[in-house]
Image (tube, rainbow, N blue to C red):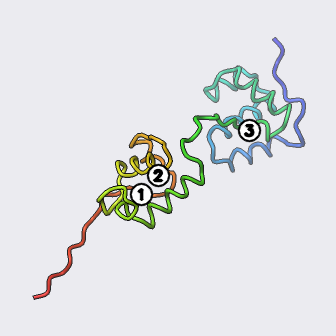
Amino acid sequence: MKALQVTKTHGLTTDDLRQMEKRTKEARDRTRLTAVRLVMEGYKAIDVAALLNIYRQSVSTYVKNFEEGGISKLLHRKTPSGRVPYLSKEEQNEIKQTILTKTPQELGVGLESHWNTKVIQYYLFKQFGVWMTREGIRVMLHRLELRYTYPTYVLKKVEY
């Protein structure tokens, strides 16, 4: 079997890669940089895989990506497409502003003076025709940087 080698260094030395390893905060990126650096230093792919506790094929893929596109291709992360959100960004911002500025009672959604996931669930269905689970609403509120807390009531001071 032919030994794995880095033929195109893209102007980078092993010291440059070592410095990048130290600066990067992502463990995944650090592993990739280390794998390419060790292959550049002459280690075999199977030895690099054993040192980094990854598969030999992963080392080959990292070197191939580095050869094709340098650091940018080596560290490129494909983000999964994921599910299409129920609400657009504009609709989510509208909901955030509504929650921050109005009460459910003002909107005629309920008699409550505070928002909770059940009231928001009803409001979303009434306003946008979207039915979300209460857990999904809680996650959306967190994503919108809103904190879900129980309401607290302050009693009016009685003067004697």
Separation of residues labelled 2 and 1 (CA atoms): 6 Å
Q: Quadrant of residue 114?
A: bottom left
Q: Is residue 152 above or below residue 44?
A: below
Residue 14 at x, y = what percent? 80, 40
Q: Is residue 100 above or below residue 61?
A: below
Residue behind mark 2: 142
The disc placed on residue 76 is 3
Residue drawn at (90%, 33%), measured in percent from left and top? 8
Mark in the foreground, 2 or 3? 2
SS category of the residue bearing label 3: loop
At label 2, the amino acid type is His
Q: Are marks 2 and 3 in contact (CB under 8 Å)?
A: no
The disc placed on residue 147 is 1
Name the outermost residue toward the top: 1
At label 3, the amino acid type is His
Residue drawn at (60%, 51%), measured in percent from left and top? 89
Q: Is residue 142 above or below residue 41?
A: below
Q: Quadrant of residue 111?
A: bottom left
Q: Are marks 2 and 1 in contact (CB under 8 Å)?
A: yes
Name the outermost residue toward the bottom: 160
Sequence-wise first label, 2 or 1: 2
> Is residue 67 or residue 136 the one in the foreground?
136
Q: Is residue 152 left or right of residue 97?
A: left
SS category of the residue bearing label 1: loop
Mark 2: give few (<14), some (14-19) or many (20+) Cα within 10 Å.
Answer: few
> Is residue 72 or residue 5 the one in the foreground?
72
Q: Quadrant of residue 59?
A: top right
